[in-house]
C-alpha cells in the first residue's frame, strides 16, 4: 500500500494521521471520502472530535492524495487481495 505523497516531496502521513483517517472512514462508511472532501470544503465536520488532524492532512497532502488512499484492513482491500490470488 503506497501512502507516500508524490506531490508533497515524498512525505508520508504520521501514525496519528492514519488513525484519524481510519476512524473517520469507519464512522462514515463506504462513502467516507465524499464526506471528508465535503468537510474539507465547508469546514463542517458534524461534531467530529479530531478536526485538527483531518484539516492538517488536507493542508499537507490535499484532495488528490486522498483519492488514492486506502484504509488499512478495509473491506475493499480485503476483497482486492482475495480476488488477486
Image (cartoon, helix red, strand yellow):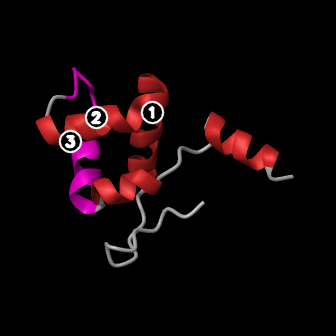
Q: Residue at x 41, y 52 (%)?
A: 67
User: Which image quarter: residue 40?
Assistant: top left
Task: Residue 66 in the image: state x and y as whole percent.
Answer: 38, 52
Q: Residue at x 71, y 41 (%)?
A: 78
Q: CA distance from mark 1 to mark 3?
A: 14 Å
Q: Bounds of the magenta span?
A: 45-60
Q: Secondary structure at mark 2?
A: loop
Residue pointed to by mark 1: 25
Q: Residue at x 40, y 48 (%)?
A: 16
Residue pointed to by mark 2: 50
- Taking the image as shown, residue 45 lies to the left or right of residue 78, namely left
What type of secondary structure mainly makes up the magenta span? helix
Residue pointed to by mark 3: 40
Tell which circle, 3 or 2, labels the residue nearer the N-terminal end: 3
Tell which circle, 1 or 3, labels the residue nearer the N-terminal end: 1
Q: CA distance from mark 1 to mark 2?
A: 13 Å
- Label 3 Cα neighbours within 10 Å, binned few <14 / some 14-19 / many ≥20: some
Amino acid at each position: 500500500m503506497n501512502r507516500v505523497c508524490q506531490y508533497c516531496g515524498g512525505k508520508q502521513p504520521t501514525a496519528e494521521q492514519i488513525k484519524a483517517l481510519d476512524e473517520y472512514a469507519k464512522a462514515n462508511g463506504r462513502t467516507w471520502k465524499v464526506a471528508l472532501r465535503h468537510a474539507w470544503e465547508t469546514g463542517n465536520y458534524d461534531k467530529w472530535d479530531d478536526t485538527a488532524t483531518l484539516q492538517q492532512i488536507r493542508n499537507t497532502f490535499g484532495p488528490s492524495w486522498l483519492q488514492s488512499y486506502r484504509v488499512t484492513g478495509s473491506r475493499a482491500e480485503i476483497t482486492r487481495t482475495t480476488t488477486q490470488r
